[in-house]
Image: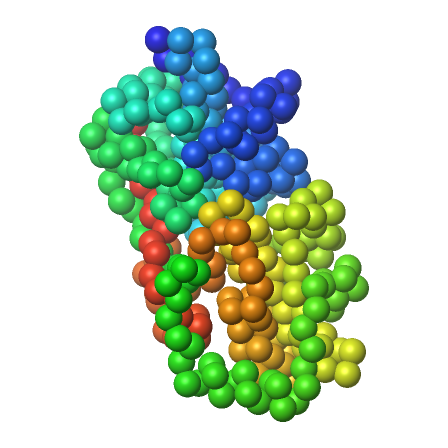
């Protein structure tokens, strides 16, 4: 009754159409987004059919001795033997389902996925669940099925900071002082031009190099490419002083969540309260159709280290915790 098939490029249109209609789909699962870094990840996404009708997708890549992966993940997942990860190049990547999917059928689906993976020689599935804030309707049948059918275990729990736009908390006094300072300094906010994005990327890269000796996940060229492919889903806002970009953010716009993919400020921007002014605009002035703004995770080392200063700043804007969970299913 349930058939598991591996995605191929011939399924490109069918895949994208299903993502748009699914209960949890965002543009990150569109193949035009997923495939921008296809040279770095050995795609092994799955399509699940029930009675010959497409009922679910599992965006995933395989890793192992013959997988051809060239880079690690964005969440420091430990790799051993031949493993399927859902998805190593995305912040989350769980099962996408149609409205007809039920709890019992989800359990059968995971049984079928397990049988498929064993036949293909996989030893483990690392499952990065989609946080509930991205669900258009309640869709946590997968979390039950992982434990009930697969006897999976929670391997990583990270915490993000989320604002419910219909029930916002007041900004902290520290954030309000920053807004007043920024207004006195006559800072200006505008939607980012390509030139603004480059200036912001340089700020972001400089900050990451100095503090963590790393670089942004996306290069400037990749970011500009994705913004051109998804102009309604990826937008930037910049803060300027005398026409100089001193702070900014890149937002990922999904049906349920406005996600701050990148946030950064130069030393001048930090001194003049640029980010406080920017997020007063994003949270309180800008009108969104989505119910949540999510600032992203404030943890490192697979959730074992909480960046207290970073999460304190996000909580100052009225955000509170939502967990991002990863499960390990040993086959």
Q: Is residue 185 above or below residue 163?
A: below
Q: Nearer the viewer, residue 151 or 265?
A: 265
Q: Residue at x 73, y 52 (%)?
A: 224
Q: Residue 99: horizontal and vertical position, in percent? A: 40, 27
Nearest the eye: 201 or 173: 173
Give coordinates of residue 181: x percent, y percent.
57, 89
Residue 281: name its quadrant.
Answer: bottom right
Whether residue 72 is visible here, answered yes or no, is no
Name the residue located 37 percent from the left edge and 70 percent from the top edge: 169
Q: Is residue 308 visible?
A: yes
Measuring 47% from the left and 21% from the top, which residue is drawn there?
Answer: 47
Identify the image quadrant of residue 173: bottom left
Q: Is residue 98 above or below residue 26?
A: above
Is 266 rendered above or below residue 272?
Answer: above
Q: Which quadrant: the C terminus?
A: top left
Residue visible at 40% across and 80% down in the picture: 172
Residue 197: horizontal and vertical position, in percent? 72, 62
**Residue closer to the observer: 87 or 264:** 264
Quadrant of the image containing the N terminus: top left
Q: Tell me where residue 107 sits by quadrant.
A: top left
Q: Is residue 37 left or right of residue 132?
A: right
């Amino acid at each position: 009754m349930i058939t598991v098939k591996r995605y191929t490029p011939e399924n490109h249109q069918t895949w994208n159409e299903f993502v748009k209609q699914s209960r949890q789909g965002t543009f990150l699962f569109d193949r035009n987004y997923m495939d921008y870094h296809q040279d770095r990840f050995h795609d092994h996404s799955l399509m699940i059919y029930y009675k010959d009708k497409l009922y679910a997708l599992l965006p995933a890549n395989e890793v192992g001795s013959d997988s051809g992966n060239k880079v690690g993940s964005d969440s420091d997942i430990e790799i051993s033997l031949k493993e399927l990860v859902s998805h190593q190049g995305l912040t989350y990547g769980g099962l996408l389902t149609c409205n007809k999917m039920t709890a019992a059928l989800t359990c059968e689906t995971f049984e079928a996925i397990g049988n498929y993976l064993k036949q293909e020689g996989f030893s483990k599935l690392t499952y990065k669940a989609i946080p509930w804030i991205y669900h258009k309707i309640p869709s946590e049948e997968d979390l039950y099925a992982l434990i009930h059918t697969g006897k999976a275990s929670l391997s990583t729990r990270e915490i993000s900071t989320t604002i419910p736009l219909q029930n916002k908390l007041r900004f902290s006094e520290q954030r309000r002082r920053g807004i007043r300072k920024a207004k006195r300094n006559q800072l200006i906010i505008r939607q980012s031009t390509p030139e603004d994005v480059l200036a912001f990327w340089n700020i972001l890269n400089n900050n990451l190099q100095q503090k963590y000796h790393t670089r942004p996940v996306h290069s400037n060229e990749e970011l500009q490419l994705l913004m051109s492919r998804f102009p309604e889903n990826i937008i930037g806002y910049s803060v300027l002083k005398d026409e100089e970009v001193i702070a900014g953010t890149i937002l990922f716009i999904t049906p349920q969540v406005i996600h701050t993919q990148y946030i950064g400020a130069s030393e001048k921007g930090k001194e003049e309260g640029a980010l406080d002014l920017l997020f007063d605009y994003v949270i309180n002035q800008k009108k969104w159709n989505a119910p949540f703004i999510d600032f992203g995770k404030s943890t490192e080392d697979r959730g074992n280290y909480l960046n207290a200063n970073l999460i304190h700043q996000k909580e100052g804007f009225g955000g509170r915790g939502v967990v991002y969970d990863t499960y390990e299913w040993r086959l």
